[in-house]
Amino acid sequence: MRLSRALPGMPASAPVRIVHLGVGNFYRAHVAWYTHHAPDADAWGIAAFTGRRPDAADALGPQDGLYTLITKGPDGDETEVISSIVAVHRADEHEALLGYLADPAVAVVTLTVTEAGYRRGPDGAADLAHPDVAADVVALRADPRAAVSTAPAKLVAGLLARRAAGAGPITLMSCDNLPSNGEALARVVRSLADAVEPGLVAWVDEHVDFATSMVDRITPATTDDDRAVARAATGADDASPVPTEPFSEWVVSGTFPAGRPRWEDAGAQLVDDVELHERRKLWLLNGSHSQLAYVGSIRGHETIDRAIADPACRGWVEQWWAEAARHLALPGAEITAYTDALLERYANPRVRHLTAQIAYDGSQKLPVRTVPVVAAERAAGRVPTGGATTLAGWVLHLRGEGAPVKDATVDAALAAATGGELPEAVPAVLELLGLGGDDELTAAVLTQVEEIHAR
């Protein structure tokens, strides 16, 4: 028996008012969860589209979008069936996407497409030179309903359909780990819209709200053990339960001119400015996660709890936190409370967050998680050992140590890292990160390469 809305006690589907691109565990552990717990959830169904792989549609479609959320506390599991996703589509179901965006009832589009999915150029605008982006531009110029492959082009196609239908305002909200992710999304969408049809930009400026959000909830990959837990709890087979940790934080800023669920009543924070929350999370949590992913996996640790239990890894993380804290405009007590909580979260052995999973897409992640702190420390005349450790771990990762490389935009970094011996590779990689020409930093990274191996 498969989990479905036909089972006794399962809720009926809410009308679709939210569309999501890139459905995966991360999204289902936060936005879908907050929407499920909003007091007006029965008016806010989510139609979700997969990313590059159809797996989520294949798993969730037969379950009417239902799935079991497993909150893995140190002492046991809590389970609940989440019902906010009411339709699941493959990424190539383009007419379905256009239909939703042309519906005035649809008020919000959310995205978790990873940093690489925004297809940004060095200036933050859409990378019009990328073959996929260029092909999408040509297709939409010829036919505004043409099927496209990139997330920004899908949004532009949807906005073209919405304008044609006179469907009114809408909010686009990034939930990815990008600094100022609403502004980043706006830059990509506006530049791509201008490339497709310059007149569309004025309509976007009048009708589209680009909301910013910051999400903090560790969500590992699903295992067969999780499926067994879900079946024991629900009495039904769940092909895609979501394991997560007890901690959850979601901070949102936007005007939402077409409305939104009452997320604040489910625990979300609605604020005027997300920046401080975002920077704290990106540097302290995500920055240390990246360090543990590379250095921990090189030292043989498969999961974050095992890595943070390694005294050397913990020491480097704490060095990184001290460096990052100097550039956060937050009270010291607040930062200490946050990092103390992170240590508890990382040490939870029941949240098996794989270092290999976190290591994905480092070429997109390090520029926002690590590089800003390293650059600020160097500008202050300091050599950041914690930051140098992350950089050393990434260079070794690119050279084949630890977690396997899985990165959509890594070609230049791979070439730099593997083009010679380490004394040549390190400055070449630093140059790509905007940290080149710095002999002291290069020396520090080379020293940390030795430390990672020696300790």
Image (cartoon, helix red, strand yellow):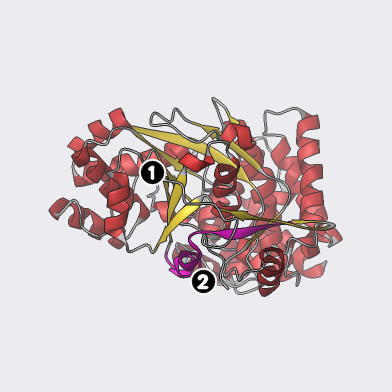
| Quadrant where the image shows the N terminus | bottom right
| Quadrant where the image shows the C terminus | bottom right
Q: What type is the residue that disc 1 sits on? A: Asp
Q: Position of residue 155 (x, y in %)?
A: 33, 48
Q: Secondary structure at mark 2?
A: loop
Image side of residue 413 versus residue 187, left or right:
right
Image side of residue 453 versus residue 117, left or right:
right
Q: Where 265 falls versus 368 (above or below)? A: above
Q: Nearer the viewer, residue 118 or 21?
A: 21
Image side of residue 424 versus residue 313, left or right:
left
Q: Residue at x 28, y 34 (%)?
A: 204
Residue under pointer 2: 419
Q: Nearer the viewer, residue 422 or 119?
A: 119
Residue 446: tell me if it is visible. no
- Label 1 crowd bin: few (<14), some (14–19), many (20+), radius 10 Å: few
Q: Nearer the viewer, residue 132 or 428?
A: 132
Q: Where 274 falls versus 401 (above or below)? A: above
Q: Residue at x 41, y 35 (%)?
A: 210
Residue furthest out toward the front: 8
Q: Quadrant of residue 223?
A: bottom right
Q: Position of residue 109 (x, y in %)?
A: 41, 44
Q: Is residue 319 magenta?
A: no
Residue under pointer 1: 123
The CA distance from mark 1 to mark 2 is 27 Å
Of pointers 1 and 2, the one earlier in the residue sequence: 1
Q: Quadrant of residue 169?
A: top left
Q: Secondary structure at mark 1?
A: loop
**Which residues fall within the magenta stretch?**
52-71
Residue 120: tell me if it is visible. yes
Q: What type is the residue that disc 2 sits on? A: Gly
Number of marks in the rendered image: 2
